[in-house]
Amino acid sequence: MSLRPLCLALLFVALPAAAELLALQEQELQQISGQAGLSLAADFNFAANPAQVRCAGGCGMRVAIRPGNSDGFVVLDNIRGLFSFDGVTLDMEKLDSGFDGDGAAFNSSVMRIGLANVRFGDFRFTLGSSNSERGSIAAGFRQTDLLTFSANGESRLQGNLYLIGLP
């Protein structure tokens, strides 16, 4: 196979990349419209690992968070199922109206997470506290499960989630 066709194709792709960037004047910028922010899409399948024997049938993913300087961990344990999102947006906006008048009183910037098409399928997790970030059956391991959430079938989320910065 000859490399000549591949080199020609790469040359045609690279030519537009060599275009000159020009500064725009204020009047030209005012004629341009667009949207700031970021759009994300992903699919995850959290499956049980049969080698993790402390859970019946194996354990799913584990997330451990140590709050402040505490000795223990808050854990999301045995996370299993399908999780996907398409078109989730991250954006900053000023919240200064709406929300039954609370927006005007708030009058500050927030991060808006737009949930266009978020899906969970056969999803479960356990919220608990633990003395270890690793979930093992080693001597001294202690975990207290506070609640287990399980959703069989498929759930869909749509709407906006607003995150505010705390002083």
Image (tube, rainbow, N blue to C red):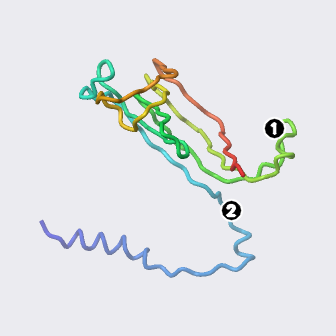
Displayed quadrant of residue 17 = bottom left
Give residue 109's position: percent from left, percent from top.
74, 53
Residue drawn at x 28%, y 28% is 52
In this rendering, the answer to whether 53 lies above or below 30 is: above
Q: Quadrant of the N terminus?
A: bottom left
Q: Is 51 placed left or right of 68 in the picture?
A: left
Tag 2: amino acid:
Ser
Q: Nearer the viewer, mark 1 or mark 2?
A: 1
Going 68% across and 66% down the picture, which residue do you hit? 32
The one nearer the camera, 58 or 21, is 58
Q: Is residue 69 left or right of residue 47?
A: right
Q: Which circle marks residue 33 in the picture?
A: 2
Instruction: Tell me how far mark 1 sits from mark 2, CA to CA.
Output: 28 Å
Looking at the rendered structure, the kind of residue marked 1 is Phe
Q: Nearer the viewer, residue 40 or 92?
A: 92
Residue under numbered circle 1: 99
Q: Position of residue 85 (x, y in %)?
A: 50, 38
Q: Where is residue 43 shown, x and y percent of the image?
A: 42, 38
Q: Pick whichever of labels 1 and 2 is earlier in the sequence.
A: 2
